Amino acid sequence: MQVRRLCHNKDNIGWGVELLRAGKQYGPLVAAVVGLLCLFRLWVPTLLAPDNLLDLAQQISVNAIIAFGMTLVILIGGIDLSVGALVALVGTTTVFVFTRAPEGAAWVLPAGLAAGLGVAALFGGFNGFFAAKTKMPPFIITLATMLVARGAALGFNEGRPMAIDESHGVFLALGNGRLFGWLPVPVVVMLVLFAIPAVVLHFTRFGRHLYGIGGNSEAARLSGIPLARATVIVYVVCSLLAGVAGMIHTSQLYSAEPASGVGFELNAIAAVVVGGTSFSGGIGAMPGTLIGAVIIGILDKGLNQAGVHFSLQYVVKGGVILGAVFLDVIRRRK
Amino acid sequence: MKVLCGMIICCVVAACVVIGCTPAEKPPAEAQTKGRSFGVVFQTMNNPFFVDLNNGMKDVIEAHGDTLITLDSQFNSLKQKNDISDLLLKGVAAVFINPVNWEGIKGSLIQARDKGVPCIVVDAPVKDAELVLCQVASDNVEAGRLAARALAQVRRPANIVILHRSVNKACIDRVAGFTEEIAKYPDMKILDTQEGQGTAEGARPLMRDLLGRFPEINAVFPINDPSALGAVSALESAGKLADVTIVTVDGSAEAVAAIKAGKLHSTSAQFPYEMGKVAAEKAYEHLEGKPVEKDVKIRVELIAAENADAYMQQKKS
């Protein structure tokens, strides 16, 4: 797989072949989405109402944005457990800047965003540097940075939520606004942040390098791929995406919550693997992850609206994740 | 490849058939008063208090021939927001909310207002009270006062630590009532207030740390029963349980059992089943067009060794 990806050249593969391959890759996932929607439609008559579907898109946005970054990291054979804690840290940092700035200053919003994303980039750079330059497993590195980020977040306001003042209208619109009066802003952000890495991954040399690193990092290094640089970039991008997700989350809650984001990394990993990205790296792509996040979102919404007991919901979700990955493994072996 | 394509086409066709055949369940006019659904979203179900609260609501709602959907937010504000919007878009008649974050719930309250669905807040209040129909909660300040008075009777002088959960307004109120009462006794002092998350898992390690830092501790105020049980377990393993008096709030069966075993001194009992019933009744009163008071307080009662048995019998019936 990774070899074919590395030599993959658009010029001698026609669009038809591309389309067929995409169909083969995403067909089962799309079928799963349609199947789940139909299944839940039996219990929930309002499931396919436009309102409800838009709400679904909005609900998955935070998880999907984190999962896009996680896809890149898993693609190069890594993992990033720190994203959930970063969601909390970026939110608290941004709101902290808001609360300390003088009333009505125009630079408050850019300063808050820059501080939040700066912290995210710092953590991403740290994760990436150690993942690239040491033999420490990324699982352990990011486990440690997860704890550091969580502790830093809880350090704000003694761990209590910090409310966002109504005067920060633009920031509050990031999570709660609607474009043209109907399209939730988080959905727009999600689609943009989907398109950029998807295009980079599929159409650029850097994208093909990532597949190479994930397939066989030693071979990639020997063939001249700048391994360390690519690794750092991937972890930084992952952290930045988690940071954006954290801002949307904070905006949606009208407050920064130092204790929020617990377990978000696991939800994102679930979306990535359901979307067909191989946990050992080298195989996978962005559209799969987006569909994976949609599948998990449909499960959450469908089970909630069908009135399934909350204890059973976890069992069903676990079963679907296991089943999806199992089918994917079987399909690849053929 | 062909097989795969075939499968997908089959799925899509089957889907269309299913969607086409399912009758669009337009509720007939008289269904407005029967077979409605209600939703409740709890910050956690990992606490027997919320199970009792849920049962109180459920009994009233099912007696009206309606159904209640219960969801568990697992202390996750984002999940709570999503859970509430799922219920609102499903078209529930009213939604009961037990907020994780008393400020962060605002977006959901605005969404409910825009949809015209009444919100009834149970147990823990919300900051934006003007957005909700009514708030039904224990008198938490009084619960804190009762705990402080009980402690003052048995432990003087006292060196107290508080195991807080400060994102929750109910806990903030309890601690406020407790500290207000303790301030009346010059020989009782509060050494420290720390975050015990309101769970046994959170309180246990915290209690151990506090014991290490303050060997002179002889009283603890954990803000609820689960954290009290966590503190008991930490004190037991340190062999200090006999020297420390614990007073708490909730009145769960587990805590009463611990009181009877002499491990806890007392708990300011709340009446969650009653709270659930009252909340559901308020929802029906509103739906019938009657005015509903904004702030409903449910009584609290101090349970110690002498009235533990009577309380448990009352709780069962």
Image (tube, rainbow, N blue to C red):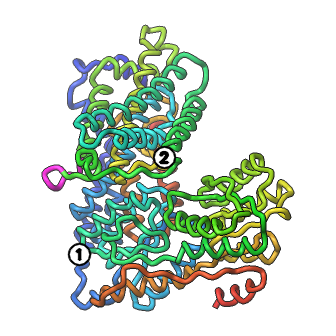
Q: Which residue is mark 2?
A: A157
Label 1 vs label 2: CA separation? 50 Å
Amino acid under disc 2: Asn
In the image, residue B13 lies at what x, y percent?
26, 59
User: Is residue A237 inside the magenta stretch?
Assistant: no
Q: Please say if B83 is above or below A269.
A: below
Q: Residue visible at 24% across and 70% down?
A: B115
Can the viewer see residue B197 in this picture? yes
Over which residues does the magenta segment extend? A179-186
Q: Provide the chain ID for the residue under circle 2.
A: A
Residue nearest the viewer, comparing A149 with B8: A149
Q: Which residue is mark 1?
A: B24
Q: Please say if B62 is above or below A13.
A: below
Q: Please say if A229 is above or below A98.
A: above
How packed mark 1 is, by other alpha carbons closer than 10 Å (few <14, some 14-19, many 20 or more), is few
Secondary structure under the numbered disc 1 in the rendered image: loop
